[in-house]
Amino acid sequence: MTVSEKIALKTRLKQHCIAVIEQRIAASKAIIDNAQEAANNEEKSSAGDKYETARAMNHLEKDMHTRQLAEHRKDLAALNVIDTTIIHTSVTTGALIDCNAVSFFIAAGLGKQQVDGKIIWFLSPGAPLLKQMLHKHTGDTILFNNNAVTIETIF
């Protein structure tokens, strides 16, 4: 694989991350809006406790999704500063790590995703697995899902 092909692949992976996170942001916003609308539309009834409980539940849901929205925005901001034009020689943020049985892209914690017909594990820079992999090089071995895998390439 040429340097330009490696950069193009990492750029596609970053764009995939951005698209997924933007979808999550949109979904969180929609849920927040729906929860607020439901809370606003909850009519006061003679059963006051029912009204207060429903409003409280809607506010709890809104608060939970507001926290998730903030986390998604933080992930997106961190992702946007990753430079995919850098070819790395050790495991670090922005690197693509191809192992004999699995591939990892260090950018955002999206888990297992399929991109261009290939399975890639997207790890956040704070992932526990990444801590094990940090500063590893080609030829080093890591433990993934209780299996030893060898790093074949890093870029």
Image (cartoon, grey):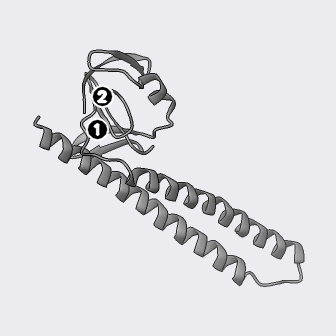
Q: Which class describes the residues within 10 Å of circle 1: few (<14), some (14-19), or many (20+)?
A: few
Quarter location, residue 80:
bottom left
Name of the residue lying farthest toward the left: 2
Tell me the SS state at disc 2: loop
Taking 66 as reference, is 112 above or below it? above
**Residue sitting at x 59%, y 74%:** 34
Disc 2 + disc 1, Cβ < 8 Å? yes
Question: Which quadrant is home to the C terminus?
Answer: top left
Mark number displayed over residue 5: none
User: Crowdedness of circle 2 by 10 Å Cα count: few (<14), some, many (20+)?
Assistant: some
Q: Nearer the viewer, residue 55 or 103?
A: 103
Q: Going by the image, does 101 lie left or right of 44?
A: left
Foreground residue, 55 or 66?
66
Label 1: element kind: strand
- Residue found at x 45% / y 43%: 109
Kind of residue at disc 2: Val
Residue 9, image quadrant: top left
In the foreground, 126 or 47: 126
Q: Residue at x 14, y 38 (%)?
A: 3
Give coordinates of residue 116: x percent, y percent.
21, 46
Q: Which mark is residue 119?
A: 1
Q: Earlier in the sequence, mark 2 or mark 1?
A: 2
Q: Which residue is mark 2?
A: 102
Residue drawn 42% across the image and 62% down it = 23
- As measured in the structure, the alpha-carbon distance from the residue carrying label 2 to the one carrying label 1 is 8 Å
